[in-house]
């Protein structure tokens, strides 16, 4: 029985209890969230994974996307990226390979992690069409659904599927135009396919069939944001909002069919539009879990886009986004390497926590850090740090003469002066 069916019957399953314990909420809170579509736990009947609850009232989760490209196919590096992402604290992985043997790479990555794994079946379908027929626009609809089912059977927990791109969405895109075009690979492929074949997106027109596949293999459906802006000047435009409306409507059908559902959001948007985007999505979708891709809040910082995205992600999480996709320093420049993945995960985890401090009033660890700093308890500070190893390495690389303080102020450590002369302790 699916998790939604269990939740509707009032049953508390083991994964609901595990998520509740991890989140320090009542199991009944998790069950009710799954029943009403506000919480998902992407599971797979084919593989045991560490349960990860995503949605209202839970900690903001971080996804790390990895995978080969047509230029760089290094399976060992991808497995190492998966390992580092998990070790650094990512909550989920998306395996988004576009080069090499899709089955082999995905299987090896899935076997190398205990995290929930997501995929975008459209990538494989279009790239295999290029390999077989010479062009993505020759992709056959039945092959797309076949690949979707095959990926599910490998133990994929959730899939980003571009359901909201249809003739109406594409018409909005054509009428308005874009400064930055389309940055979603799935969105670009599907729009080109629809225009060339003058056919509706099969993921939209055959949505009920798609739901049958999702339900049979218990995959969580993440409704892809193929129309997201790839440039700040295209943010929150008609095509993006049209797709959001379509996805929100379909998300209700999906939940009613017993398929756990997430809705994805932008993209590139300035900070003053984040609040509106989160509220609009939550309102239109009946508060389904919101998966925010960044967002990137300026376009002019290549090489530092992990920081740009963290600013956007901390705000989106604070306003109510439930799940954020990391961005690495290599964004817009190159395929991320292992160190980029580490930087991306750490930065996104910082953003998620900043958001949770507002959204969930999760401030206990900050209070502990404040006290540890006041008392100059360095080991405790490292324990509480998001990246203890890095914090320790920085201090050790510039060791102080007076071991109690650090070399920032040395002999004039404000905390030490206060400690010697006053008692402000709380
Ligand atoms: S030396 Fe300065 S920066 Fe370092 S612990 Fe003391 S007050 Fe903080």
Image (spheres, rainbow, N blue to C red):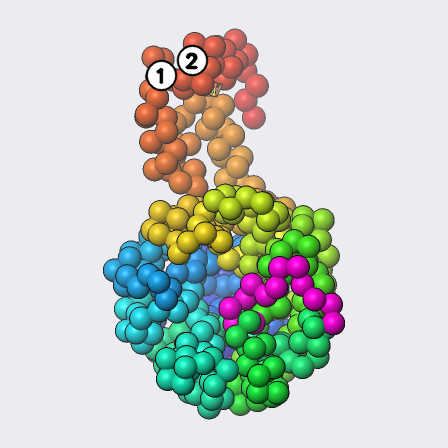
Image point (60%, 88%), residue name: 199
Q: Residue at x 52, y 75 (%)?
A: 189
Magenta run includes residue 179: yes
- Tell me if the residue at label 2 has its CB under 8 Å from ligand 1: yes
Checking the image for residue 400, the label placed there is 1
Where is residue 259 drawn, in percent x and y? 54, 80
Tags 1 and 2 touching, CB below 8 Å: yes
- Rendered view: 358 above or below 157: above
Q: Secondary structure at mark 1?
A: loop
Q: Residue furthest left?
A: 76
| 300, above or below 56, in the image | above
Name the residue that disc number 2 marks: 410
User: Which label belongs to residue 20?
Assistant: none
Residues in magenta, as a range = 175-187
Residue 51 visible in the snapshot? no
Residue 162 part of the magenta-drawn span: no
Mark 2 element type: helix
């Amino acid at each position: 029985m699916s998790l939604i069916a269990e939740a509707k019957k009032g049953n508390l399953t083991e994964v609901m209890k595990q998520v509740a314990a991890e989140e320090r909420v009542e199991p009944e809170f998790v069950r009710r969230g799954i029943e009403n579509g506000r919480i998902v736990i992407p599971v797979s009947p084919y593989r045991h994974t560490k349960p990860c609850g995503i949605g209202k009232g839970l900690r903001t989760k971080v996804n790390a996307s990895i995978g080969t490209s047509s230029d760089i196919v290094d399976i060992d590096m991808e497995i190492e990226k998966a390992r580092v992402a998990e070790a650094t604290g990512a909550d989920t992985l998306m395996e988004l390979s576009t080069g090499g043997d899709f089955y082999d790479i995905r299987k090896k990555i899935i076997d190398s992690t205990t995290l929930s794994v997501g995929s975008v079946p459209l990538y494989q379908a279009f790239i295999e069409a290029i390999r077989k027929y010479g062009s993505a626009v020759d992709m056959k609809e039945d092959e797309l659904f076949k690949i979707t089912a095959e990926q599910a059977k490998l133990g994929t927990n959730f899939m980003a599927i571009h359901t909201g791109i249809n003739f109406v969405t594409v018409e909005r895109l054509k009428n308005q135009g874009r400064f930055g075009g389309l940055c979603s690979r799935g969105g670009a492929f599907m729009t080109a396919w629809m225009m060339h074949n003058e056919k509706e997106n099969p993921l939209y027109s055959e949505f009920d069939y798609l739901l049958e596949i999702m339900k049979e293999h218990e995959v969580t459906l993440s409704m892809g944001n193929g129309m997201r802006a790839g440039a700040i000047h295209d943010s929150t435009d008609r095509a993006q909002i049209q797709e959001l409306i379509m996805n929100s409507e379909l998300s209700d059908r999906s939940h009613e069919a017993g398929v756990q559902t997430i809705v994805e959001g932008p993209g590139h948007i300035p900070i003053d539009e984040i609040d509106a985007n989160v509220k609009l999505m939550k309102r239109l979708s009946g508060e389904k879990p919101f998966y925010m891709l960044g967002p990137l809040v300026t376009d002019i910082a290549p090489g530092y886009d992990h920081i740009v995205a963290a600013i956007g992600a901390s705000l989106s999480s604070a306003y109510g986004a439930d799940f954020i996709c990391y961005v690495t320093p290599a964004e817009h420049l190159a395929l991320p390497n292992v160190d980029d993945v580490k930087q991306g995960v750490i930065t996104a985890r910082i953003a998620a926590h900043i958001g949770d401090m507002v959204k969930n009033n999760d401030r206990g660890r900050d209070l502990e850090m404040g006290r540890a700093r006041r008392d100059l308890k360095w080991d405790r500070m490292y324990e509480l740090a998001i990246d203890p190893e890095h914090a320790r390495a920085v201090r050790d690389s510039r060791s102080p003469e007076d071991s109690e303080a650090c070399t920032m102020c040395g002999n004039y450590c404000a905390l030490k002066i206060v400690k010697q002369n006053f008692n402000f302790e709380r």
